[in-house]
Image (spheres, helix red, strand yellow):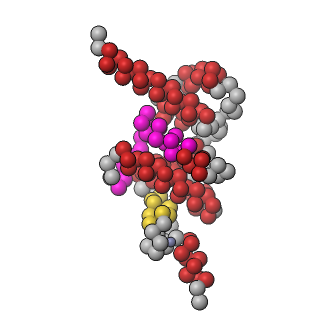
Amino acid sequence: MDTTSGDARFDRYYRRIQLGLRLLSHGARAQTACDWSGLTPDRLITLKRRWLPDAGDGFRGPAPTSFQPFFRSSVRLSHATVFISIHQALCQRSMSHAKSWDLQPGLENGERLCTAYEIFREWEPTADMEFDQAALLARGAASSEDIELFRCLHCQSAMLIDKWARRREVCSGCRGRRSASP
Ligand SMILES: [Zn+2]
């Protein structure tokens, strides 16, 4: 009997359950929790009843698909930049340093996404960013089709840019300092 592969399968199964619970505890939409954990909706409902009886329902309705809300407020933009920076730092520790990649839902990617979201929540506990928005940001920045993390040419701070809008070369902080200087 091959106990090693049996252990590995059990390990992945156990990790899927843990990931499913983490996703549910972050209020991920049901479909999002299924996609990233690989668990069925029935399995997730059972897990939630058993282990998270007091957790509220996750967000309902369609998952967010637009990046525009992040660019309409400087606070949201700053939070989005922090989240993507954390996520990319975690990815670079475990992946090749490819400039862009396709972030598909799956166990390892889901675990990293949850870890990034948990670190972000520690950092910005009052931020208005639900898990599905974080997932959207992570995938958007990974593909770098619509958004990209860029470095301010002046101070090197990370800044998130909308690739469809007029390109900004310096961050809002440096722009403010420039216009304030005599
Ligand atoms: Zn700057």
> Residue 91 in the image: x percent, y percent?
40, 47
> Residue 118 in the image: x percent, y percent?
56, 43
Does the magenta portion include 108? yes
Report the front residue among 66 and 125.
125
Residue 103 lies, with reference to residue 77, above or below; the image says: above
Quarter of the picture holding the C terminus: bottom right
Instruction: Tell me if 36 is positioned left or right of 8 in this view.
Output: right
Name the residue: 54% across, 46% down.
119
- Highlighted range, magenta: 99-118
Report the front residue among 143 and 77.
77
Q: Can you see residue 41?
A: yes
Q: Residue furthest bottom?
A: 182
Residue 40 lies, with reference to residue 119, above or below; the image says: above
Does the magenta portion include 90? no
Report the front residue among 40 and 86.
86
Name the residue: 60% across, 41% down.
62
> Residue 48 in the image: x percent, y percent?
62, 25
Q: Can you see residue 164?
A: no
Residue 165 lies, with reference to residue 145, above or below; the image says: below
> Residue 166 in the image: x percent, y percent?
49, 71
